[in-house]
Image (tube, helix red, strand yellow):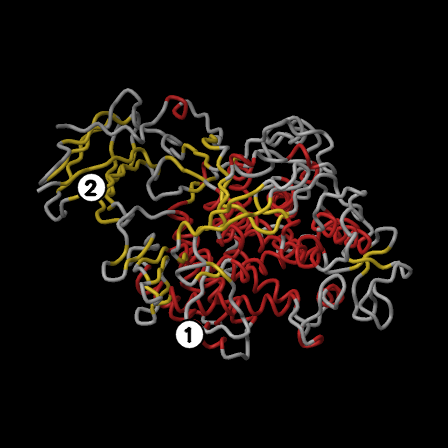
Amino acid sequence: MKTKITFLLMTAFLLAGNLAQSQVVIQNDSTFKTADQMLLANELFESGEPFAEALGYNLDDLDPMVLNSPDSISYTTGIENYEYSRYLLGTVISRSGIGLHMMWSPMVTQMAAMEPEGFDGTFTGGMVNGFNEDDELMKMIGHFSMLANQMAPANPFPQFAEFETGNMHLPQTVAPDFQMDFSSLRWDRDKMDKTLNLAAMGQTMLKQYWWAKDMLGAFHDAEDNGIEADGTNSPDSVGSPNFDPENGIYYGGNNLDGFIGQVLTAESVNKTLFTINSLAYDGTSLGMVDPMTYDPANGIQYFPHRIAVTETMVNEMLPPQMDELTVTDASSHLWDQLSFLWATLSFKNMMDPEINDPEHYAYHEVFDGDPFPAPMSVTGMPGPFDLMMGTSKVIFMNTLAMHFNATEGTFVDVSNLDGSGQPVPENTISAENAGYSLVVLAKFIEEFAATPLEPMAANALNAQTDFIIANLKKSQGGFYNSYTLGNGGSSDPQSLSAQAAIIRGLYASYVSTGNTAILQGANDAYNYLINTFYVPSKMAFRTEVFSITATYDPYTLAVLSGALREASLVGNQSDAATIYTRVFKNIYNGMILSEAEQSGETGNDSDGDGIPYIAGGTLPFVFAARGILDINVLGINPVISENSEIRIYPNPATKYATIEFNLIESAVVGIKLFDLSGRLIHTEPASNLASGPHSIKVALNSFTPGTYILRLDANNDVQSINKLIVSK
């Protein structure tokens, strides 16, 4: 029976010559996946001000109120990427309430227990409620305010451990004063999945690092003027780690930066303490792991995929308190481990007492005892630096023990424990995890240089790189979406995220190893990505090879941002920044739900970019969970009559198939056939045909049974893409 293929027909709209860009249609603006949104925040941060500066732009030339000046690349990277990244983190860690409140964090509860009798109410306006923790938190926040010369905003919800998902539709309208009073930005807690997930916590913490690093790398004076740290100046008293209120030097590049940077760091330290003290799992129960003595060979203690939280309302004036933790998915997921390891490695670098540069001169003052404890090398007691280093060691060793198949030379996505507590890894590695494993391993090698762990990480990075090239890479171009040991690459159509993640990882591997063959492989992968997935006329990427509908989500946008940025900076691909800017304007901007002053918005849609101002609405400044775009590129130069159906018969076919069409003008016509993975398997010689009806017969004798993609081109313009089924 003849099968009519309709998924790539020309429309009268395109035939009329209207080439206006298609708009992203948001399909889900409710489901917030913390790990995915925070990965996007991290990739956007790196594709923001650091990218703009690396491209040679002067950030002082940028004005958020002057759209696309001095040009669109500088504005997209230096303003929009950076600010959208800030929006995402601010929403998660201080406004939404999607996690466990800092009042109940490890450091606050420990210090609260040490306070003398009568402490209750001393920092909360005399409100005696039977708890020291709220006063202890206010005491800490007040201290941060003094050190930065900045008052805290009203009604924040600072948290130390993030939940996996929530509903981002606000139960109230955002008030005009949302910048300093966060109460109208709170999400509905009853619609949150109160489950802890290491990827959600790790990606959030990584963004907390990027922001804290940016904010605490300098000092400022009482007039809020920046002061560069030079190794001799300090906010502290001479010969003391304690703050000197008389010397006119404060923490952070300005008042607000200094305050927020300290809060972000405190949240991250507590997150890490909570993880190693409460979330380590031995296959039976949750507990603590000691980084100083831990060796997985003596018994695995790892961090499971999902841990449900039960909460108790202890007082209507206080945030809910964690009551019970229950493991609901005991498997170990590679992405969880990589995410948290990436964050702890980054904070380890920031806190490292041995690194001396202008940024670290300022960091040394932050981690010298006030506001945060000094390292063990100074005090004899573990400090935040030792915590981050030790936690990095634990997660790295667990990841090797549970996820790395040394025989095959690859990590695998998921692992479990058997009844005797031994790791039982599964057999599949996704392209995304393979690529990002290289990114994190390269960071680990840098941070653990000259230690016994460095060669272990280097061996794993080299093996994973070799595995990607030998097994995930397709001989016809691009990469499989995943690879299963013993079975081979997946047969699914290639995805955008798979290609982009491999590109991201190969560039990181090249930077770590200096192997130019890896650089060539990364550049080849980039060229395949652009040639196969990028649609210039739509200023968009396909999200699946041959798909005419692109489906975007925060994860895909994150990985694409990282791949294009690294292609520009490491691969020296001259078109990457331009392509990224065009796609950002068309796709990323279409996915953000709201924005505020920092990116040029002052009310309604004052900057005319189609993104609403947050005040007066009920959606936060985060990205939609899913958006779709019609990627149909047919008819840019149409030569097939809109009144003539392109017919393929028979379909299914055995020995041959005939393609019938009607030209409205003379054209050079060619036919190409691809398999479902995108491999070109047959090209029918092009013919110069006059206007009118035509038919072309394609012999199928050499084709194996299956489904193929038949593409008809005219004058180098795609006219039709149809499915052809070949049967015996």
**Closer-to-camera residue (158/313):** 313
Q: Which one is nearer the viewer's eye here, 680 or 458?
A: 458
Identify residue type, mark 1. Answer: Asn
Q: Are marks 2 and 1 in contact (CB under 8 Å)?
A: no
Amino acid beneath label 2: Thr
Image location of residue 212, percent across then percent down: 67, 56
Residue 307 numbered tag: none
Q: Is residue 144 left or right of residue 519?
A: right
- Alpha-carbon neighbours of circle 2 within 10 Å: few (<14), some, or many (≥20)? some
Instruction: Please report the residue visible at 50 percent of the width from the left and 33 percent of the height from the top.
Output: 30
x and y percentages locating residue 151 in the rendered image: 80, 46
Confirm whether residue 505 shows in the render.
no
Q: Please tell me which residue lies in front, 601 or 417.
A: 417
> Tag 1's secondary structure?
helix
Residue under the image location 51 percent in, 53 percent down:
562
Give percent across and percent down for residue 306: 44, 50
Mark 2 or mark 1, earlier in chain: 1
Quarter holding the C terminus?
A: top left
Secondary structure of the residue carrying numbered label 2: strand
- CA–CA distance between discs 2 and 1? 52 Å
Residue 56 seen in this snapshot: yes
373 sits to left or right of 631 = right
User: In the picture shown, does residue 446 fall above or below 222?
Assistant: below
Task: Locate residue 333, reporting x and y percent.
Answer: 41, 56
Q: Which residue is mark 2?
A: 707
Counting every numbered tag in the picture gives 2
Q: Identify whether 682 is placed above or below 187.
A: below
Q: Is residue 560 left or right of residue 481?
A: right
Residue at the far right in the pictured view: 246
The quarter of the image holding the N terminus is top left
- Residue under numbered circle 1: 298
